Amino acid sequence: MTELSEFANSSELWPTPTGRWSVLGIEPEVFEQKLLAAGLAPSSLRPYHADELPYLDGLLLAGALSTAADPVALLRTLTPSLKPSATLAIIDWQADGPPTYGPNFEVRFKRGLLCRLLRAAGFGQVDTMDYHPVYYEVFAVKGPPRPLPHAAEFVEVAQLSDLPGNSMKKVEVYGHQIVVANTGREIVAFAHACPHAEGPLELGRLRRQLIACPLHGYIWNVSTGNPVMPDDEDCLRRYSVKVDDVRDTIMVSLAPPPESIVAD
Ligand code: FES
């Protein structure tokens, strides 16, 4: 069988790991070599031991979720023990990847659900390094989200009268591709890239609060950001909206809506 390490390509995609790191999962020696190739000092590698978790700057889970009896329980055990600002790097098989590679579908752990659980566990930065069809690499940093420049500034993006119910429009705010939509009840703004695999959501089908992605048909609620079908995906990133009825304008900022909560 093709091994995960034959796909995972850390040295090209990862930020340089610093501080103390350990590897948990399959082929730990091979993945330790990948950490070294990515720039980690040899003296910074530690054999994995649960008691060392609070002292690590980084932990690499290599196939650990798809080989764990209960991957959610594993995450809930590991994440509270890691110190603030620690990095958790996860490499594992895509849950909907080709059956010719990797383990049975029943044991694969969804990248989308992983990202959602990490945010709920206090990891404010959760980045997918590559949307590879066979495997995923996720980098998560424990602590508050990375501050976005200009996040507090509202930018005029559309005329209210140009956006009737059940319509949407792609706009750009400080370099971010965003969709503004009229659900018939409210004006909302959300990321143009679908959380599943970056499909262009402004080309999807909007019916009231629900949007179906044009690539694989997954459905999200654009008012809450929650995944609807399937419901074990990541949440849709949303942005703050202001509507000025008098000036007939819609304004968007990069900050999340005030009522945003991280879904569990
Ligand atoms: S990219 Fe797959 S459902 Fe959107």
Image (cartoon, rainbow, N blue to C red):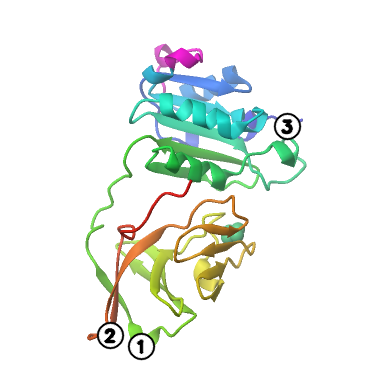
Q: Quadrant of ligand 1?
A: bottom right
Q: Is residue 46 above or below residue 184?
A: above
Residue kind at label 3, given as amino acid type: Thr
**Where are the magenta residues, as a range?**
40-52
Rate crowding at label 1 as few (under 14), some (14 to 19) or many (20 or more) other CA atoms within 10 Å.
Answer: few
Q: Which residue is mark 1?
A: 161
Indicate which disc, 3 or 2, sits on the residue closer to the N terminus: 3
Q: How many marks?
A: 3
Q: Which residue is mark 2?
A: 248
Q: CA distance from mark 1 to mark 3?
A: 55 Å
Q: Is residue 15 above or below residue 27?
A: below
Q: Which residue is mark 3?
A: 2
Q: Nearer the viewer, residue 83 or 101?
A: 83
Q: Secondary structure at mark 2?
A: loop
Q: Is residue 217 above or below residue 107?
A: below
Rate crowding at label 3 as few (under 14), some (14 to 19) or many (20 or more) other CA atoms within 10 Å.
Answer: few
